[in-house]
Image: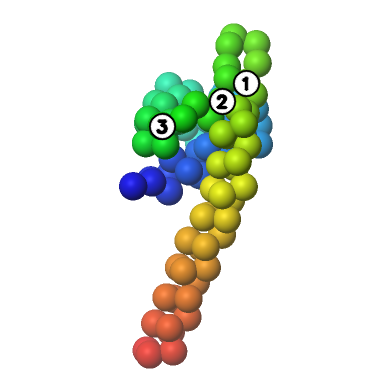
Amino acid sequence: MLDLRQVRSFVVVAEELHFGHAARRLNMTQPPLSRQISLLEETLGARLFTRNNRKVELTNAGAVFLNEARELLRHSEAAIQAVRKAEAANG
């Protein structure tokens, strides 16, 4: 099962294409961020990034997942808003 924190972290790394910058945006340090991405890659069974000391790039699988991840995050936010709206109407 996907962890939304890992998905959110993936999207930020994909947007930044830099683990250090992404970690700062996420208010965390780089080692836990790298671990989250590794765990996500294990869950998906695919490498999402190619990386070396100078460059981070999305793989083909990463590019496909980026679109799906953004949609998943939009849906999760919509679900939260729907629940809050329903709760406000009841109470």
Mark 3 element type:
loop
- Residue depicted at x 56% and y 42%: 65
Q: Position of residue 66 (x, y in %)?
A: 59, 42
Observer-nearest residue: 82 or 75? 75
Observer-nearest residue: 1 or 11? 1
Q: Are marks 2 and 3 in contact (CB under 8 Å)?
A: no
How far apart are labels 3 and 1 at the CA level?
A: 19 Å
Label 2 Cα neighbours within 10 Å, binned few <14 / some 14-19 / many ≥20: many
Q: Are marks 2 and 1 in contact (CB under 8 Å)?
A: yes
Amino acid under disc 2? Phe
Q: Which residue is mark 1?
A: 56
Observer-nearest residue: 6 or 46? 46
Left or right side of 62 for 32: left
Q: Position of residue 55 (x, y in %)?
A: 65, 16
Label 1 Cα neighbours within 10 Å, binned few <14 / some 14-19 / many ≥20: some
Q: Which residue is mark 3?
A: 45
- Residue depicted at x 44% and y 40%: 6
Amino acid under disc 1? Val
Q: Which residue is mark 2?
A: 49
Observer-side mark, 3 or 1, equals 3
